[in-house]
Amino acid sequence: MQDGHALDVLRGFPGLEAESALWLSHQCAVYGSLQHDQQCLLASIGITAEEAGKVPMTAEEAKAASQAAARLGGSAGLASARSFAAAHQHLAVPSDYVHDDYPLGRWLVAQRSKERRHLRATGTAWPPGRRLTELDPWWNPPWHFPWQRHYQQARTLWQEGSLLLPGQHGPPGGRDEDEDPLMVWLRRQCARHDVLQLEQQNLLADIGITAVTARTVTASLTRPALGEIELAQARSYAAEHGNLAVTDRTRYNGHPLGSWLLHQRQRAADGRIEPARITALNALAPHWNPPWPLTWQRAYHQARAATDSGTLTRTDRRWIRTQTQLWDSLHPSQQQLLAHLGATGTAVPAPARTTARRYPPGEGLPHARAYATLHGHLAVSTHTHHDGFPLGRWLVQQRRKARSGQLSAPTLQELTVLDPWWNPPWPFTWHRNYHLHCTLAAAGGPVPEDSRRWADRQITQWDRLHPHQQALLTTARITTAP
């Protein structure tokens, strides 16, 4: 009401200041997306749903009204997010996205960062984030945000009725499937469907990609684009040499086998490799992606071949003797491999050479030692802190160094003694879920639904798992039916 008189909606609220009139015009334009309490407040000053629908606005007027609403209605970012969500039903925008001259993408990146810091510090939800959650429940998902952006692109096509799955005729936009980023992403989701989070699987089901659909699509795609040529070369090499411990520069039959295997190991470390690919490579060589440096694996196979042929050289014997002296610091699987060479841990270690140079232990080792003593493992998340030290980030760095052969021998040995599987050859998220399930089961109480569902999934995927994963699950009483 204005001075006891009703507001004139049709004439643009004459008598009010320009900013206030534009703000009210914006509320009329977005009336349908307002909360019930907001609509009641507007009704108290004479702006009902019927009155709001009478406001005619050009594109320029709507833009000016949105900017005025941002200035008068609290946070400019929140107003921009509300305007975008009202038009698109989501907030999955790129970081450089600008909406109505406002840097909405950068603002949302900052809000996601604030919510994650608040969650790590307090373990509770970030109160300001509730408004954004009302606009889009997945504005800050627990998975990588690029996944959410790709999903929204696919959902938009699905809502338009033009979403086609990989292998179907006529990919979106008329482009080839191998060149279309969205088609490549859809193909990857079908291949990785079983290892996605339950919420991701539910979102995919909303656009028609169920578990059955994903398996059907993956089984139908046997094109060279999925790495079948490289896998065939790996199969041929393993049949000829008995292993896949090749250097990064190894070429086989004209194909870059070494660089392809390096790429598969990197994808396995990031959890981005298809389960079927892991199954195939595990069948060819169980230690194609060992948790120890690949240089050790190559040296072992060289000594194994020399032992089998009776052509052991002095260098081979010296290497085997060195492994015997380091026996207690080796991974259990390394010890099993060395047993095939007749090596055991009973030999007397050679006296250590004295040197004037001393190497102090890494700053993270005392924290890793204390954590492993308390919990029995080192399967910590990236954000884990121990006594104020970023243990999770430090272990990520050590795993990267170990895979590239740059980790110092003392650090590698101590970490292996603390936890033989501190650097597993399978996705680290799997290892964290395994230890979480073991901890919950050992507590004796009811196991949460998510953890029970994870255990059931391991049984259905048993044949795809690494032999050592199967052994770990067996110790946790998770196994296939006899």
Image (cartoon, rainbow, N blue to C red):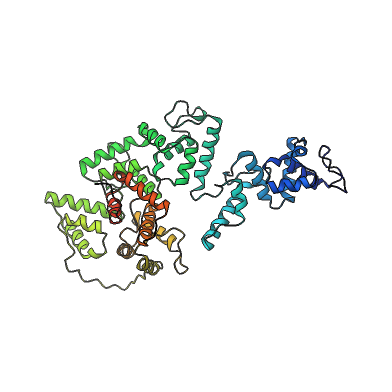
- The image position of residue 95, as x and y in percent, is 58, 47
Residue at 21%, 65% in the rendered image: 325
Residue drawn where x is 32% and y is 38% of the image: 230
Is residue 71 rendered to the left or right of residue 432?
A: right
* Quadrant of res 83: top right
248 or 382, which lies in front?
382
- Residue 20 relative to residue 77: left or right: right
Figure disc tally: 0
Image quadrant where residue 377 sits: bottom left
Residue drawn at (29%, 54%) of the image = 477
Please provide percent x and percent y for residue 69: 73, 47
Q: In this view, does 171 lie above or below 417?
A: above
- Can the viewer see residue 404 in this picture? no
Give residue 9's position: percent from left, percent from top. Answer: 81, 39
Query: Looking at this rendering, what residue extends furthest in the left direction?
Result: 310
Compare residues 147 and 344 and report the one nearer the observer. Answer: 147
Q: Is residue 72 left or right of residue 452?
A: right
Q: Nearer the viewer, residue 182 or 54?
A: 54
Q: Vertically, is 346 above or below 255?
A: below
473 is higher (above) or lower (below) than 21: below
- The location of residue 259, given as percent across then percent down, is 34, 44
In the picture, measured across the screen, residue 219 lies left or right of residue 54, that is left
